[in-house]
């Protein structure tokens, strides 16, 4: 059990080291003057280099232990392993501001402080290997925690990082507005695959009809959403009008077009809804916002990578005949070329990402407060340690 706990402890230390590395460059001016953040990163690197026990395997992390103490360590190690996915998914100093970096830095420092306390408490465990220089490590963690509190800490960083990819909701359609939300959710998921121009136009046209039907239901059940739906309907009418000459064969998007048309059909078949269905309409509005952002980013990618084109007419006859009539010659050019098109301003003005400030969940603040109180209680109950080892 002691060896197993030490393997779990190493997994938590790895997360602490990665968290400090992800946030410390915001506060390190030079390599010679590391400061509290750089010092903690250095101490954690030395500690990890001295540990000889291996990291826990995936089966060990996923299997519950019959002993409550070991199970608690397993849960901490599992959370650390999952938390490692956050750093390449947006939790690093290049995408965090100073206040968000302080939150990550303080969490890692406080966690290290707890590990140093437990290292002393487990000294009678047979075969227990103490951390290298735990006194210096604890002092570095405490100094780093105090340094992080010198500025404003933004705990909305809890809402960032890795999230599991959403999946299509398969199976028979759900009753009522839930079935419409099911189809709209599938539209959002299927749009993660780049659609060709034809299927994107189908999605745009059907989304205009879906919003029109949602507006009709919102007038009686959720009047606060009427203006929002009316503005969205107008946006998609403009998009459908401006994308009539949009072309591009790269991509697929057939499933997204089919699900969007399915959402339109389900919503048309619904009878007038009551006030009790207002939460379902708000959920549909949330899915609409996600779909708008996805379509906007898709169009921007098509513009930037020359995956979408627009047709330009030339004052001459073409070679192709349609029902015996020779059509005017046309040429496909990138949408970002000097050719004027109304699609670009519509996309960037009406589908641009709206800044939404994330709010930290209340349970995260409460758990941090309780943990801080536990650390303070230990500091009061234990005498001042001697020289750092």
Image: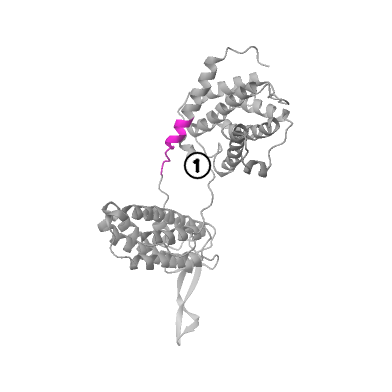
Near-viewer residue (64 or 117):
64
Q: Position of residue 84 (x, y in %)?
A: 60, 40
Near-viewer residue (59 or 357):
59
Residue at mark 1: 160
Q: Name above or below for residue 90 compared with residue 118.
A: below
Q: Is residue 309 magenta?
A: no
Q: Name above or below for residue 257 compared with residue 60.
A: below
Magenta stretch in the rendered image: 356-367
Q: Name above or below for residue 152 compared with residue 382.
A: below
Q: Position of residue 292 (x, y in %)?
A: 42, 56
Q: Residue furthest bottom?
A: 324
The quadrant of the rendering that contains the C terminus is top right
Look at the image and tell me whether residue 342 can be seen. Answer: no
Near-viewer residue (106 or 78):
78
Q: Name above or below for residue 287 compared with residue 81.
A: below
Q: Position of residue 261 (x, y in %)?
A: 42, 67
Q: Is residue 357 magenta?
A: yes
Q: Left of 381 or right of it: where is 284?
A: left
Q: Quadrant of residue 70?
A: top right
What is the total number of numbered labels drawn onto the structure image? Answer: 1
Q: Residues within 10 Å of mark 1 (few under 14, many from 20)?
A: some
Label 1 element class:
loop
- For image coordinates 47% across by 34% down, the residue present is 364
Q: Quadrant of residue 134?
A: top right
């Amino acid at each position: 059990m002691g060896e197993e706990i030490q393997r779990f402890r190493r997994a938590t230390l790895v997360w602490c080291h990665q968290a400090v590395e992800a946030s410390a460059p915001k506060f390190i001016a030079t390599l010679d003057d590391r400061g509290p953040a750089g010092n903690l990163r250095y101490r954690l690197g030395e500690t990890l280099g001295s540990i000889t026990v291996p990291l826990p395997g995936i089966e060990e992390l996923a299997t519950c232990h019959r002993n409550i103490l070991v199970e608690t360590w397993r849960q901490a190690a599992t959370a650390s392993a999952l938390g490692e996915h956050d750093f390449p998914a947006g939790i690093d100093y290049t995408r965090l501001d100073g206040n968000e970096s302080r939150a990550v830095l303080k969490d890692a420092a406080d966690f290290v402080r707890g590990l140093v306390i437990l290292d002393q408490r487990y000294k009678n465990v047979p075969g227990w290997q103490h951390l290298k220089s735990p006194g210096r490590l604890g002092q570095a963690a405490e100094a780093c925690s105090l340094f992080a509190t010198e500025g404003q800490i933004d705990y909305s960083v809890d809402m960032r990082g890795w999230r599991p990819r959403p999946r299509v909701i398969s199976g028979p359609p759900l009753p009522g507005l839930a079935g419409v939300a099911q189809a709209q959710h599938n539209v959002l998921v299927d749009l993660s695959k780049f659609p060709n121009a034809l299927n994107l136009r189908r999605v745009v046209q059907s989304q205009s009809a879906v919003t029109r039907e949602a507006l009709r239901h919102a007038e009686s059940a959720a009047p606060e959403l009427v203006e929002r739906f009316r503005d969205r309907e107008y946006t998609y009418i403009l998009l459908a009008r401006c994308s009539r000459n949009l072309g591009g064969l790269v991509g697929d998007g057939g499933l997204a077009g089919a699900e969007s048309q399915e959402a339109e059909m389900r919503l048309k078949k619904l009878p007038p809804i009551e006030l009790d269905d207002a939460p379902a309409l708000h959920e549909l509005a949330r899915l609409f916002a996600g779909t708008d952002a996805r379509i906007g980013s898709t169009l921007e990618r098509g513009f930037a990578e020359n995956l979408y084109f627009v047709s330009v007419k030339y004052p001459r006859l073409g070679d192709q005949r349609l029902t015996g009539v020779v059509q005017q010659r046309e040429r496909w050019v990138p949408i970002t070329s000097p050719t004027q098109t109304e699609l670009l301003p519509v996309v960037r003005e009406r589908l641009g990402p709206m800044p939404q400030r994330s709010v930290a969940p209340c349970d995260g603040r409460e758990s941090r407060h309780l943990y801080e109180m536990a650390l303070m209680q230990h500091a009061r109950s234990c005498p001042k340690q001697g020289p750092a080892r």
